[in-house]
Amino acid sequence: MRQASSPSRHQKKILIYSHDTFGLGHLRRCRAIAHALVGAFSDLSVLILSGSPIIGSFDFRARVDFVRIPGVIKLRSGEYTSLGLHIDIEQTLAMRASIIEQTAKAFDPDIFIVDKEPLGLHGEVEATLQVLAERGTRLVLGLRDVLDDPDIMREEWQRKNVLPALETLYDEIWTYGLPQIHDPLAGLDLPPKVLDKVCFTGYLRRTLPTNRPTTEPMPFGDDPFVLVTPGGGGDGVELVDWVMRTYEARVEPLYPALVLLGPFMAPEHQAAFMERAASLRDVHIRKFTPNIEDYLDQAMAIVGMGGYNTFCEILSFDKPTLIVPRVVPRREQAIRADKAEECGLVKVLAIDDYPDVPLMTEALVALPKQPPPSTAGFSGLLDGHLTITRRVADILGEGRTPPGTGTRPDAAPAPLVAAGS
């Protein structure tokens, strides 16, 4: 077991890597973790490495900054291509790997958190992991609650040769969820040596920003409304179209709907939806906003696609929710939605039923009468930031568990169990 970073450092530093090929999920998760950590530690700085093309649209707290690496995009075929540069994908990946390694060497973090991809996109953080391991940096793999079907993930991690890094490089694996809802590593045939590193943190609570810019007035005044959010929007056209068709049909009276399209929805689709909404008195459309929390807070119910961040927002703002999950290129959203419905947290419509207007009408009529997620009775459901803060305190020598002692990473936090289980 390698030694931890020197405790003599006065300024503690955490580096977070997010490959960000498409959408908002990885970036928003890393940003939420960074903000929680600098809020908990006055002597801590966090630097985020991100390939998101819109990272500059977000506000960051003091002592949180980012380095933008060249962007790539994942096509529906599963292949990648350069996002902004008209160069070969291999050149782009080589540039990204070099920037990541040089940034890590210069920043010299106490902790390096890698989001989701153990070796990074096409292995781009493997060299950085090796360098930081030699320096004694604590290496953490952060996983969302759902990855994909176990058979797919097992084959993918075998193909990418992930296991050696999980066994010998990573010190801890943080899973941002609860095992009672879903265990992303179940069925992957991982050895006990790896599973002993796993800490289930609970989901990441979202709150209203304290110093947020003033948002636009709500379009329906004080009247209750349903918020429709396709997340980043790049693959949310069917969801928005399905909702729009339902309001256009007017089979049943419905509460007004506010639709937030997301920054990655194609301009032609955005324009078409805006035009359709202009003739509907009870549908209002707005484009991307990085400050979605106000809308979530004031909405009476939510219709969304079921990405990790949307799910955390649903739980945090405790709204009755209808999820219409995507199934390509991964089944992650569908798995999460099905598990959440089984646990009594949300209701689900399958995207395969699109564009069945009577079915969506029935779901929207029933939506406001659904119980909120809190009635499902889970303990520790939104303890993610608290658990992560405890672990960071231990790693930095400010808590009970010195790094490198072999103590299980999940020993410090209280057990997370479902009420009544």
Image (cartoon, helix red, strand yellow):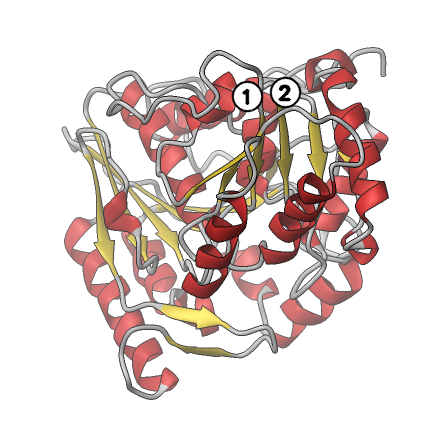
- Report helix, strand or loop for mark 1: loop
Q: Quadrant of residue 307?
A: top right
The residue carrying mark 2 is 319
Which of 134/332 is in front? 332
Query: SS at mark 2?
Result: loop
* Relative image position of residue 76 (x, y in whole percent): 59, 73
68 in relation to 59, above or below: below
Please tell me how crowded label 1 is: few (under 14), some (14-19), or many (20+) other residues with Cα within 10 Å. many
Amino acid type, residue under disc 1 in the picture: Ala
The residue that appears at 23% across and 67% down in the rendered structure is 99
Is 10 placed above or below 355 here? above
Specify whether 88 is left or right of 144.
left
In front of the other: label 1 or label 2? 1
Disc 1 designates what residue? 299
The residue drawn where x is 53% and y is 26% is: 384
Q: Is residue 130 left or right of residue 213?
A: right
